[in-house]
Image (spheres, rainbow, N blue to C red):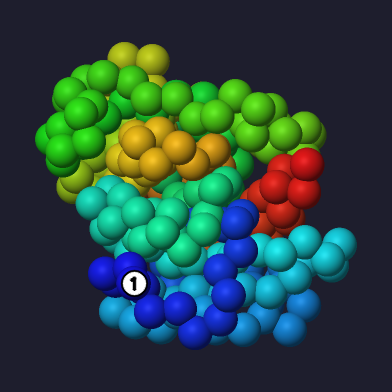
Amino acid sequence: MPARLRPTAPIASDAVLVGDPGRALLLAQELLREPKMSNHARGLWGYSGETAAGKRLTIQATGMGGPSAALVLGDLAKLGVRRALRVGTCVAVEGSCRLGELLLVTEAVAAGGSATSLGVAAGKTVRPSTALTERLRAALGEDGRGGAVASFDAHPAEQSSPDGIVAADMQTAMLLARAGSLEIEIAALLIVTESADGERLDKDRLERAEKLAGRAAVAALSG
């Protein structure tokens, strides 16, 4: 039995991972037919069901920060997850991204020390699945762009990002590293919710971006 998740419904082999439990609920309602709650332990809401195309899918909250996300992914691996897509949020670096823009992660720099627990030294880069990233790119079309991110252990707006980074978050590098050790195919799609000068995306635009990102994730996982 996994240490953190307590599944109350079957877990699919494909999963969409989100940090926020509220986003998990939103995407379950948007993407699944008759979703069933598959986890509520520790406040990590998860839902499982079928997409409109009849594809089994789990949508699981991972909590805040890389260590929490890595632990949840480990539990999901024990429950049979083999492919995952992170749909999360990020902070733009020096005006390089627009608020509400969808950013397809091409690589992630481990800018926080916690990644060393997974064998990734601070400053080193981890990359997502090439095949899954390309399917996600095709699903996004003109609605997204690619770029490199840095993942920190503290709020990214308070950190200094390495050169070549367009945005920063708190999970992606850890998730990519953990997925590699678990032999899970993974990619990441981030919504720019905060500008470099602190302007934040409003609720309505965030919800539209979340739904767009969720639909792209379903299309990528359908391949």
Left or right of 91, for residue 160? left
Residue 172 location, x and y as percent? 38, 41
Identify the residue at horizontal 20%, vertical 29% (top origin).
Answer: 119
Residue behind mark 1: 1
Name the one closer to the observer, 36 or 106: 36
Residue that protrudes farthest toward the top in the picture = 163
Total number of numbered discs in the rendering? 1
Residue at point 47% right, 63% down? 79
Relative to the observer, which residue lies in front, 169 or 59? Answer: 59
At label 1, the amino acid type is Met
- Residue at the far front: name it: 1
Residue 97 locus on image (x, y percent)? 51, 33
Q: Quadrant of the N terminus?
A: bottom left
Crowd band around label 1 with a 10 angstrom C-alpha radius: few (<14), some (14–19), many (20+): few
At numbered mark 1, what does the secondary structure look like: helix, strand or loop?
loop
Residue 90 at x, y = what percent? 42, 45
- Residue found 35% across the figure and 36% down from its top: 181
Q: Is residue 109 above or below residue 26?
A: above
Residue nearest the viewer, comparing 223 with 20? 223
Left or right: 121 in relation to 213: left
Q: In the rendered image, is residue 130 in sight?
A: yes
Q: Does residue 209 appear to the left or right of 76 in the view shown?
A: right
Reply above or below: 216 against 162: below
**Furthest residue to the right?**
53
Q: Quadrant of the C terminus?
A: top right
Does 99 appear above or below 28?
above
Q: Position of residue 73 (x, y in %)?
A: 39, 54
Residue under the image location 22 percent in, 36 percent down = 118
Describe residue 158's horizontal placement relative to residue 197 as left or right: left
